[in-house]
Amino acid sequence: MSDRRKILIVEDEARIARFVQLELRHEGFETAIESNGRVALDKILHEKFDLVLLDVMLPELDGMQICKQVRRTSKVPIIMLTAKDEISDKVNGLDIGANDYMTKPFAMPELLARIRATLRDAIQN
């Protein structure tokens, strides 16, 4: 069994998902990608992930609804990674339980730093 951290990338834009996946794998993370909101929710609730990168605008079930439902039963760290950049979107995402909220376009070094910080916080809590 691998002791590498496993991250679920929930993103319906295939190019972005693949880019993030390649970068995370290069950094030593195990990854999975899901583009459908309903399927992603099922995976989050029934599989073991160390962190979830969650887009907001997804088919079938949006990221805000996913976050709300996950928080009912899980403390898995969630970083919202989305094009929705209004202050109200950020506040809402954090208030419903996201650990962090990052807008697109993003710099990969910053995303990696936020992932490390979120995982570090999760270990301490």
Image: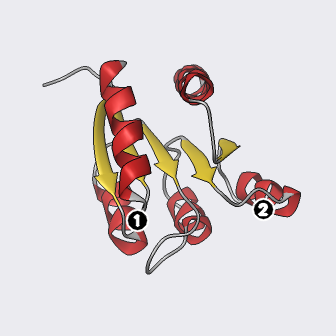
Is 4 left, or right, of 101 in this rendering?
left
> Within 10 angstroms of label 1, few (less than 14), some, or many (20 or more) residues?
many
| Picture coordinates of residue 24, whole percent (x, y) | 38, 28
Is 71 left, or right, of 99 in this rendering?
left
Type of residue at label 2? Asp
Q: Nearer the viewer, residue 107 or 66?
A: 107
Instruction: Tell us which disc is closer to us: 1 or 2.
Output: 2
| Picture coordinates of residue 29, whole percent (x, y) | 33, 26
Q: Which residue is mark 2?
A: 89
Position of 94 relative to 102 (above/below): below
Q: Quadrant of residue 100?
A: top right
Is 7 left, or right, of 67 in this rendering?
left
Q: Quadrant of residue 118?
A: top right
Decide: marks 1, 2 in contact (CB < 8 A)? no
| Picture coordinates of residue 44, whole percent (x, y) | 37, 55
Q: Quadrant of residue 122?
A: top right
Q: Which residue is mark 1?
A: 41
What residue is rendered at 49% in x and 58% in y? 73
Task: Return the residue found at the far bottom.
Answer: 60
Quadrant position of the N terminus in the picture: top left
- Disc 1 to disc 2, how far (Cα)? 20 Å
Helix, strand or loop for disc 2: helix
Q: Earlier in the sequence, mark 1 or mark 2?
A: 1
Is 45 left, or right, of 96 in this rendering?
left
Q: How many marks?
A: 2
Quadrant position of the C terminus in the picture: top right
Q: Nearer the viewer, residue 117 or 113?
A: 113
In the rendered structure, find residue 23 and report the number of the disc placed on it.
none
> Within 10 angstroms of label 2, few (less than 14), some, or many (20 or more) residues?
some
Position of 29 relative to 7 (above/below): above
